[in-house]
Image (cartoon, rainbow, N blue to C red):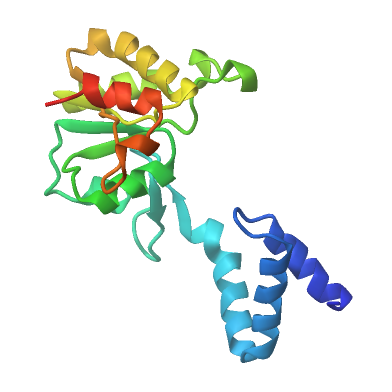
């Protein structure tokens, strides 16, 4: 059994996604067995996390606050990259989704993070989404195509339909990411909805 303070640290770690009781205890034991410098470095990095990492003022992605750099505008690496296509915008629900798309290497434009999806069960309606900011950015930056990359869930589909309707007046073409059978999987294990979308989105 862990000592009291070690249990406090473990309970805090358990609040992280994917970290259960045993995993948290293992992390604490590892920190106790390692050099104290590791715990001190981790504590310092966590202490500065909210000061050094903030939302990008243009898209909502995570941006690094560089010491000595101008306070505004605070831009993420994607928005600051001049090699990106400035007329192509990908709309995602969360920063995690943006990161997943970036890992694919298939997106050459920029992003806009909604922060949430339309979800009546959670009390999130259209007015809770930053639609005005999104539309203003599309107009101001001359966006030609908006790729809606919300997840293929009930809330994701509802949000995608809302976006296609709301963005119709901006003049930008609105497209939706395809969904289908994961690469390397067998068709017999795919659900009916996934297979139906794969057939409908064939090319």
Q: Position of residue 120 (x, y in %)?
A: 59, 15
Q: Residue at point 31% right, 19% down?
A: 135
172 over 90 or under it: above or below? above
Give the quarter of the figure containing the N terminus. bottom right
Q: Residue at point 34% right, 55% down?
A: 70
The total number of labels drawn is 0
**Pick the front one: 77 or 154:** 154
Q: Is residue 199 left or right of residue 29?
A: left
**Pick the front one: 197 or 188:** 188
Q: Quadrant of residue 50?
A: bottom right
**Pick the front one: 148 or 69:** 148
Q: Is residue 96 left or right of residue 180?
A: right
Viewer can see residue 73? no
Q: Position of residue 2 (x, y in %)?
A: 83, 77
Q: Residue furthest front?
A: 188
Q: Position of residue 71 (x, y in %)?
A: 39, 52
Q: Residue at point 12% right, 39% down?
A: 85
Q: Is residue 31 left or right of residue 82?
A: right
Give the quarter of the figure containing the C terminus. top left
């Amino acid at each position: 059994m862990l000592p009291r303070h070690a249990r406090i640290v473990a309970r805090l770690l358990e609040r992280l996604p994917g970290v259960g009781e045993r995993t948290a205890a293992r992390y604490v034991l590892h920190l106790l067995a390692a050099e104290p410098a590791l715990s001190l470095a981790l504590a310092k990095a966590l202490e500065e996390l909210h000061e050094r990492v903030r939302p990008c003022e243009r898209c909502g992605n995570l941006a690094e606050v560089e010491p000595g750099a101008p306070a505004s505008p605070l831009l993420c690496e994607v928005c600051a990259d001049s090699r990106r296509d400035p007329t192509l915008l990908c709309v995602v629900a969360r920063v995690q989704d943006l990161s997943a798309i970036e890992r694919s290497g298939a997106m050459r434009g920029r992003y806009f993070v909604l922060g949430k999806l339309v979800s009546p069960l959670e009390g999130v309606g259209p007015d809770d989404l930053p639609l005005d900011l999104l539309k203003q950015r599309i107009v101001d930056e001359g966006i030609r195509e908006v790729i809606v990359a919300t997840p293929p869930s009930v809330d994701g589909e509802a949000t995608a339909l809302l976006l296609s309707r709301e963005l119709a007046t901006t003049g930008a073409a609105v497209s939706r990411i395809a969904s289908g059978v994961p690469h390397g999987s067998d068709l017999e294990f795919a659900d009916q909805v996934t297979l139906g979308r794969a057939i409908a989105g064939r090319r």
